[in-house]
């Protein structure tokens, strides 16, 4: 005689063979491994899908619609988009600093150089790009990528790629910043 009971994990009614009473079964709804009771719960009404003993990866029982496939999520692609914008901003800033370096006269004193740089950095567009590119976009992209992974969004590669980009560039930027701080403190001493 089948045993009918509610899954303790998801409260869905399920049915098992009485030979698996007190044994582990996999809930067909939530896929959790649960212990089948010795007797039916009278509150459950037939017909019900049956859980398979011990099987972790079981196909959905007959008569039970397959669990909804996680729909392809845009979140991962948004994170990837942020990574691309981030890369473009970094590349743009690098190019800009290269052109700046060319504008500096070769025999300029340290003060003249910093004056020139400060004047150039006063550019609101540049400030916006560097703020947006190096703060807003990476933070947003990282949050989106993590959200996509936590929600098990498919496909996973955009979110993973975005995380790798932010992780690698974050490390490089942190390294550069540390280097600058180290150089600055070495010069100050
Ligand atoms: Zn369940």
Image: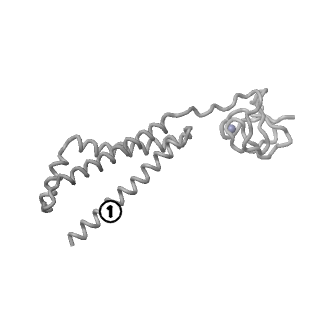
Q: Between residue 157 and residue 8, name the one nearer to us.
A: 157
Residue 133 placement (x, y as % from top left): 33, 44
Q: Which residue is rendered at x = 51% and y = 40% of the image?
A: 148
Q: Which residue is disc 1 drawn over?
A: 178
Is 125 placed left or right of 38 in the picture?
Answer: left
Q: Position of residue 143 (x, y in %)?
A: 43, 43
Is residue 188 toward the left or the right of residue 17 in the image? Answer: left
Residue at 47% in and 43% down:
145
Q: Quadrant of ligand 1?
A: top right
Which residue is rendered at x = 44% and y = 37% of the image? 78
The colour scheme used here is one colour
Residue 97: x and y in percent read 25, 51
Judge whether 140 appears above or below 107 on screen: above
When asked about the image quadrant of residue 18, the answer is top right
**105, 51: nearer the viewer:** 105
Q: Residues within 10 Å of mark 1 (few under 14, many from 20)?
A: few
Please state the total of marks drawn on the protein image: 1
Residue 55 in picture, x, y percent from top left: 76, 44
């Amino acid at each position: 005689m089948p045993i009918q009971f509610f899954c303790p994990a998801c409260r869905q009614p399920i049915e098992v063979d009485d030979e698996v009473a007190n044994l582990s079964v996999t809930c067909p709804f939530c896929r959790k491994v649960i212990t089948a009771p010795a007797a039916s719960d009278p509150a459950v009404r037939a017909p019900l899908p049956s859980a398979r003993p011990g099987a972790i990866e079981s196909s959905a029982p007959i008569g039970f619609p397959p669990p909804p496939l996680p729909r392809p999520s845009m979140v991962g692609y948004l994170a990837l988009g942020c990574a691309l914008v981030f890369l473009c901003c970094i590349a743009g800033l690098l190019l800009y600093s290269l052109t700046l370096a060319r504008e500096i006269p070769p025999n300029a004193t340290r003060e003249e150089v910093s004056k020139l740089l400060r004047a150039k950095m006063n550019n609101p567009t540049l400030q916006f790009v560097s703020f947006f590119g190096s703060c807003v976009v990476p933070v947003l992209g990282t949050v989106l990528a993590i959200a996509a992974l936590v929600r098990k969004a498919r496909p996973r590669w955009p979110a993973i790629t975005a995380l790798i980009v932010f992780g690698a560039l974050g490390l490089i930027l942190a390294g550069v910043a540390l280097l600058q701080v180290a150089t600055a403190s070495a010069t100050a001493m």
